[in-house]
Image: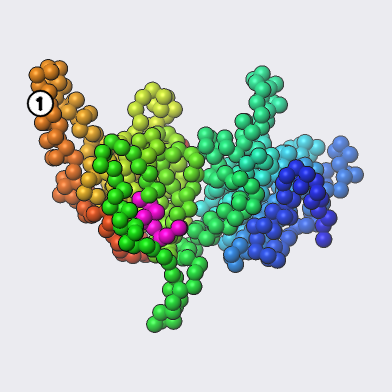
Amino acid sequence: MAEYNLEKQHAKGKLHAIERINALCDKGSFMEIYAGARHQCTNFGMEKKEIPYDGVITGFGTINGRKVAVYAQDFTVQGGSLGKVHGQKIAELIEKAIEIKCPVIGVNDSGGARIQEGVDALCGYGDIFMQNVRASGVIPQISIVAGPCAGGAVYSPGLTDFIFTVDKISEMYITGPKVVKQVMFMDISSEDLGGAAIHSQKSGVAHYRCQNEAECYEKVRKLLDYIPHFFGDTVPFTEKVGKTSLFGKTEPTYKYSSDKKAEELKNVLPEDNKKGYDIRNVITAVVDDDTFFEVMPEFAGNAVTGFAKIEGKSVGIVGNNPGFFGGVLNCDASDKISRFVRYCDCYNIPLLTFVDVPGFIPGPQEEQKGIIRHGAKLLYAYSEASVPKVTVITRKAYGGAYIAMCSKHLGADFVYAWPKAEIAVMGAEGAIGILYAKEMKDPANAELVEQKGQEYRDTFMTPTIAAQRDYISAVINPEETRARVVQSFKLLDGKTVSDKLCKKHGNIPL
């Protein structure tokens, strides 16, 4: 049994590596492996240094009764620095997790590469990166940044599926404040350079920001209840024990406040179609009670992504959010949605998309950031996804953004529109400004222009034309949404796609 220096970590306001593992895993379930591993470095007096378990604890345990692989770097042992053996331990753990089909959770708390080992340390990082890529799409990979994570070390979390950060203790950056000061003559704190808030709100690197470590580990455990634990695993059902059917199978139970939520859906849209509202109010009114678990809640607020349960079964949720920035699609929102859609498609998690989008954002700032490239990722992700896809257009669906948000044209299985949906190339004001540009120059034509604007709204901005042309499956009342979605996913259960072209892989516009 190793001797752990708990007090040294506690003095920094952090848990020790072994405490972190125990907080993640079910009580008494963790089994450590490679505890006897030691470095072979003889440079700079390293042959005299005893580094227990080479600074990283690795092993297997269970979370909510299901097996997981876990590693946690120990900052109290040589600063958690990564040498060749340290890297091999992590890489071999991931490799074994692939073989036995279970998620990998890594707790990062390290001073970086072990300088005394030179290129051998870099070899350790390379081994990890290779296994991260091999595992991608095979088993879920979750990273927890619970201390410093700098230089090459950041790319292992960057390759994983979900990154959790913790206020005041997470640090993530390519180069730290000291190097930034030397090279760029800029004074900046670790928090402002790569703290939890920076990566959850601005960079989009982190998926979750937690107030403390206890909240972090609880959220990781919760996430694992929503996602399959390996490729080919079934989409999780709610864990509650349900009634036993005539066939002797236990049916999952769920709670859905139908009357209350039907009323919420009836009243969710503002009278003024230019006013915003929170798409989360639509999402929570459609999914099972208290099951929406948002992903990246602080980044690109004009788009909402997350997992939820519908009749006890996990689905991936995407929505434009008119309550933030009008719900437009920009570079960040496109990236956020694309990444989430591809994750769900990896593990056969059905997708439910709520659309209320006025278009891709115009202007030089987003054009120069590459909105064309970023928006193309969204088109690619939805087109490539072969999982069951259901789309609900709640209000606006304009131009290229209508197509991009999982339209029938990109392979949506069922597309529903609420009666007030506006499916058009652009809004009435923009369209009239182009179609009747000459008439608008003469103030005497104001009444004519207003008349033409109303005609455009009545003729082109209703879901009727889209329904006539078979672009939407049905026009439904808001309160019917839950029932339609449930029925649609039941019909799509077991969906297969047979028209895959022969190719190595496509070239997504990264």
> Where on the picture, by quarter, is residue 485?
bottom left
Q: Residue at x 67, y 57 (%)?
A: 23
Say left or right for 96 vs 284.
right
Residue furthest top as drawn: 442
Above or below for 391 versus 206: below
Taking the spot 70% from the left edge, 51% from the top edge, the residue there is 72
> What residue is shown at x 67% (from left), y 22% (from top)?
187
Q: Is residue 434 visible?
A: yes
Q: Which residue corresponds to the image point at 45% horizontal and 74% vertical from the top-left?
A: 242
Binning the other alpha carbons within 10 Å of mark 1 as few (below 14), some (14 to 19) or many (20 upward) gives: few
Horizontal and vertical percent position of residue 99: 60, 61
* Relative to 185, 330 lies left or right: left
Can residue 39 be seen here? no
Disc 1 marks a residue whose amino acid type is Glu
Q: Is residue 495 magenta?
A: no
Say which of 395 and 489 sits in front: 395
- The kind of secondary structure element at disc 1 is helix
- Asked whether, in this view, residue 406 is left or right of residue 504, the answer is left
- 371 or 385, which lies in front? 371
In the rendered image, the vertical position of residue 42 relative to residue 259, given as above or below = above
Q: Position of residue 224 (x, y in %)?
A: 54, 58
Magenta range is 282-291
Q: Is residue 283 magenta?
A: yes
State how many labels appear: 1
| 154 or 252: nearer the viewer | 252
Q: How is the image coloured?
A: rainbow
Q: Quadrant of the N terminus?
A: bottom right
User: In x, y percent, where is residue 462?
Assistant: 18, 43
Q: Which residue is mark 1?
A: 447
Q: Position of residue 169 (x, y in %)?
A: 67, 41
